[in-house]
Image (tube, rainbow, N blue to C red):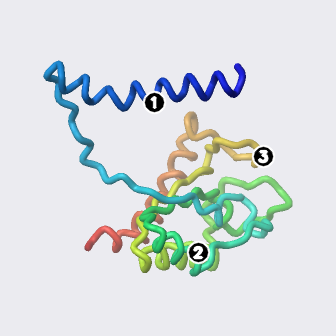
Amino acid sequence: MHRRTFVKSAGMLAGAGLALPDLMGAVGTSVSKNKLPKWKGFNLLDFFSPDPNSSRKRTEVEQLKWISDWGFDFIRLPMAYPSYLKFDRTKNITPKEIYQIDEQAVDRIDNLVSLAHKYKLHVSLNLHRAPGYCVNAGFNEPYNLWKDQEALDAFCFHWNMWAKRYKKYLQG
């Protein structure tokens, strides 16, 4: 499809979409409003790589201030769990190593979450790579989340750690 045809088709679809609520009202059908908040914001990729020494630049306080000042209210932290573990990175991770939390790495995550809250930004943690599962290739897991109980146990261990750690943000 040519760009011009695509833009023309997309414009016609968008125009039809704008008229849809009027058509719905005309036939007496009401459209219910979603009660969930409409968050607006960004992915912050500080902990996205399984290698915490990757060359990715870390988010700075000034950037969080800009996000807030510009009217955004949300950040998503896609995380690779190996980014906050201590293990021998020259070898594949073992089941035992999946539980070796690096407190210094977790402190960096805590700091980012705390700063985001300081600027009134809602934070969504996303274990983009969790024990036994990842949407990307490039890191060998010792088991499969969909087949192995050990993977499920490790997955729950990590989410429980984060839930306990950030419970305070849910209490007012």
Disc 1 and disc 2 in contact, CB within 8 angstroms: no
| Quadrant in which the N terminus appears | top right
Residue located at (40% from left, 68% from top): 164
- Earlier-in-chain disc, 2 versus 3: 2
Residue located at (26% from left, 43% from top): 34
Q: Residues within 10 Å of mark 2 (few under 14, many from 20)?
A: few
Q: Secondary structure at mark 2?
A: helix
Q: Secondary structure at mark 3?
A: loop
- Callout 2, which amino acid? Gln
Along the viewing direction, whichever of 147 and 35 lies nearer the viewer: 35
Q: Which residue is denoted by mark 1 in the rendering?
A: 14
Q: Residues within 10 Å of mark 1 (few under 14, many from 20)?
A: few
Q: Secondary structure at mark 1?
A: helix
Q: CA distance from mark 2 to mark 3?
A: 30 Å
Q: Could you say which quadrant of the image residue 54 lies in?
A: bottom right
The x, y position of residue 107, in whole percent, is 57, 78
The x, y position of residue 130, in whole percent, is 59, 51
Disc 2 and disc 3 in contact, CB within 8 angstroms: no
Q: Residues within 10 Å of mark 3 (few under 14, many from 20)?
A: few
- Earlier-in-chain disc, 1 versus 3: 1
- Callout 3, which amino acid? Gly
Along the viewing direction, whichever of 92 and 135 lies nearer the viewer: 135
| Quadrant in which the C terminus appears | bottom left
Q: Which residue is denoted by mark 2 in the rendering?
A: 63
Mark 1 vs mark 3: give the one in front: 1
The tag on residue 138 is: 3
